[in-house]
Amino acid sequence: MGQAPPRPMTPGEFLAWESSQDLKWEFDGLQPVAMTGGTRAYNVVQTSTLTALSSRLRGTPCRGE
């Protein structure tokens, strides 16, 4: 498993580094941050949020239709 480098990275350096890692990482603008695995609770919140937004935006210009 890889370790995040200690110095600030450029986005290009991050993408090159991240592609060789076992874990998923995101870039905060300066350094890699390990992403947590999805949980059932996270999936419920994500689905509920998406459903609520979709319902609210239906028929509006924000919907992209």
Image (cartoon, rainbow, N blue to C red):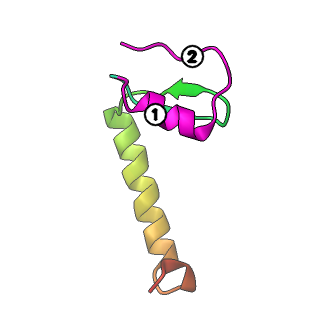
Mark 2 and mark 1 in contact? Answer it, CB < 8 Å: no
Q: Is residue 35 visible?
A: no
- Residue 10 painted magenta: yes
Quadrant of residue 54 within the rendered picture: bottom left
Name the residue at 41% across, 54% down: 48
Disc 2 marks which amino acid?
Pro
The picture places residue 60, in percent across and down from the top left corner, at 53, 85
Which secondary structure type mostly characterizes the magenta part of the structure?
Answer: loop
Residue type beneath disc 1: Ala
Q: Residue at x 43, y 45 (%)?
A: 45
In the visual, does 40 lie left or right of 25?
left
Which residue is label 2 attached to?
5
Q: Is residue 31 left or right of residue 56?
A: right
Read off the magenta span: 1-21
Which residue is disc 1 drawn over?
A: 16
- Please state which of residues 32 and 57 is positioned toward the viewer in this rendering: 32
Q: Could you tell me which secondary element the residue under label 1 belongs to?
A: helix
Badge 1 density bin: few <14, some 14–19, many ≥20, Cα 10 Å: few
| Residue at image point 48% right, 13% down | 3
Image quadrant where one finds the N terminus: top left
